[in-house]
Amino acid sequence: MNLLNTKLPIMNLRGRRFMYQFSVGLALLLALVGHVGGLYRLGGLDRLEAVIYDYKLQADMPRTVDERVVIVDIDDRSLREIGRWPWPRETMAKLTANLFQQYGVAAVGYDITFSEPDQSSGLPVLERLAVGDLKGEGDFAAILARLRPRLDYDARLAEALATGPAILGYYFSLTGPGDSAGQLPPASIDCAEVHRYGISPLTATGFNANLPILQDKAADAAFFNMQADFDGVARRMPMLIEYQGRCYGSLALIATRHAMASGALKIRPSHGYTPAALALDDLIVPLDRQAMALVPYRPPGAFRYISAADVFKGTAPAADLEGRAVLIGSTAPGIMDLRVTPTSKQFPGVEIHANLISGILDGAIRWEPVGARMIELIAVLALGLTLAALLPFVAPLRATLIMVAALALLAATDLYAWSHWHMNLPIATSLATVLGLFVLNMSYGFFVEVRSKAQITRLFGQYVPPELVDEMAKDPARYSLRGESRVMTVLFSDIVGFTTISEGLEASQLAEMLNLFLSHMTRLIQHNRGTIDKYIGDAIMAFWGAPMSDDRHARDAVLTGLAMQVALTELNTELAARGWPAVRIGVGVNTGRMSVGNMGSQFRMAYTVMADAVNLASRLEALTRQYGVGVLVGEATRESCPDIAFMQVDKVRVKGKAQPVTIYTPLGVTAEVAPARLETARQFEAALEDYNAQRWVEAEAKLQALNQATPGKLYDVYLERIAQFRNTPPPADWDGVFTYVTK
């Protein structure tokens, strides 16, 4: 069989019956894809997603009482003992002053707005009389002047607010004409910074905020808007809302910030699948694209409620309040704010803020990965296409096992992401895909064994690691032995002085040592998803980027080269125990466009790569001996690894190439490299800059200092060149390139 002309069969449909099964499966899959892609919404799937989320939340939520957050409750008893709502600001002033001065709370957040002046003291009436009917009457004006501070309840509340970190509450109008009242606090964060990371908070049309006299004295203010999902359940809350180009923070967010005495709010950019987040020093609040956060609910009763009457009278236990974050809200009928949540159909709104504060402090805010819908779409397509192509060909029992395994895998992946990473994955459509295709295909029956996995294993098993063969078999249509052009990375390694080593060992010992060495190195390469191309005596050739695509092929290859150097320590210990000499290796890595595929003759084929970039990697491996470094890489490889630190070694013309190339040695992942190592690299590159500029004295001094601190062949190479150039200066058009005339 000529493998170059082999085509992998995706399906061997037997007649119209199997074609119909496949077509119906595709029709179902397309309907589900339209839902995931947002072309339309299938209400049943949205409800299933919500039910799954609620179940996960209820199953995993903490069952303990969080003592860090306390709710001062304007309850029925408070209304009976203090008076009907709204209370005079004098009452709120005493309540606030007691919390800060008597109980020493960390911060107070108000689930209340003070947007209108308090006239309960009668002061406005007295002031009108002073300039009206009683003007000039005896000492009335003087008496009123003495009484005014006591009767100005708004001023008294303002004074109380100034005694501690008080966060007033207000709300935004998100629809409607946009009327506004009161004074907003300063913006919490720069909206331009938020937008830069793809976040578009809800936009307000107006607001109802607090009186300026109160806002000026309070430490801050925050909105307490809540947002329900399509089914009326409050699962996520806005953390930021935008108004006239400014972004303002929620009550839970701002209260946490002041309770923890954190610095200014900052935005942390997304990384990989991790979404952008708000940062309160070390506390992180992951956001969705509308600047909302999922509420990490605890069950009802998870927070201590203290009657406002007890705080007002000073009889509340001090130990229950000291150092706590306090929220003032109400559970009294008629004034309480009830919400439907995943844990209760009647949930006090103030307790939602408490749950958010608790979740922020615990770092337990759930988050959805960046591109969650794209992940779901890929999962649905991968599952759907695989099952639609697979299920018509398997027996019912096997189909059942596949269905159960797929559901178990989805559930396990989802629960693992939920419990270990706090990640909420959309899974309802994937479950519907598996169950729907199973039901459709079971109605027709399964009679034909699937063949694609066996064939792809037969074709690729001799070229790539078994782990990759298994992964490729999940989607065999993507892979072929036909030649193609790809940007890939190739690695060459070779034992330094292998001829000398081989002369000192018997043939059997040499074979055993070589097998041990190649096994260690191959294990590393395959662990990092590399493909072994061939063994050339003691040399290894491997590549990344085929047959499976690898967006990080350059990084994987470089880290493999460094890992091979590290692995020599363990290997040499094992060799020494057997009385064999230690080994050193040189590694060359290069990235570029290559031809990859099944190549050879009609007598023998090999899945390999060919290109000028491959030849350069081989030359780089040989040059490691010239400079005394373990790994050398080309320019394209360095540019493809932004998170890896490199040190420039030289600019050379290798044999067979007229174009000079800059070569580098990798130091490791930048965040993990010791600062001293980075500093040494910087000093060497400074010396190299002097060398290229023909500043021989400066270059020599820097190289000698480096060589004295940590002797190395690399420094000797340049010191010898400098000595030679002093006697025989380079030509005027010298570009600093060193030309090698041998491989």
Image (cartoon, grey):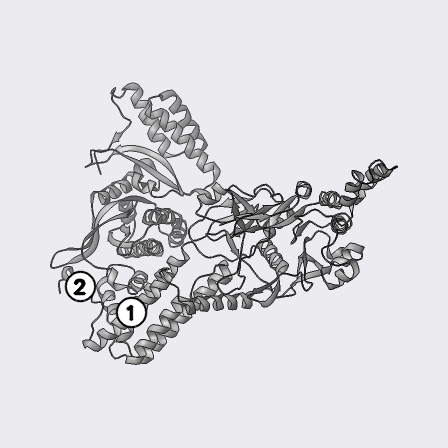
Q: Quadrant of the C terminus?
A: top left
Query: Disc 1 vs disc 2: which is toward the camera?
Result: 1
Q: Is residue 461 above or below residue 278?
A: below
Residue at the extreme left: 602
Residue 285 visible in the displayed image: yes
Secondary structure under the numbered disc 1 in the rendered image: helix
Front residue of 405 and 202: 202
Amino acid type of the residue tagged 2 in the rendering: Lys
683 vs 585, left or right, is: right
The residue at the point 31 percent across, 26 percent down is 721
Look at mark 1 in the image and give the residue it sits on.
27
The residue at the point 41 percent across, 24 percent down is 701
Q: Residue 546 at x, y = what percent?
A: 26, 54
Q: Is residue 352 above or below residue 609?
A: below
Residue 259 visible in the displayed image: no
Q: Residue 568 at x, y = what percent?
A: 38, 49
Q: Residues within 10 Å of mark 2 (few under 14, many from 20)?
A: few
Q: Residue 383 at x, y = what percent?
A: 34, 66
246 vs 571, left or right, is: right
Q: Residue 488 at x, y = what percent?
A: 27, 48
Look at mark 2 in the image and give the residue it sits on.
7
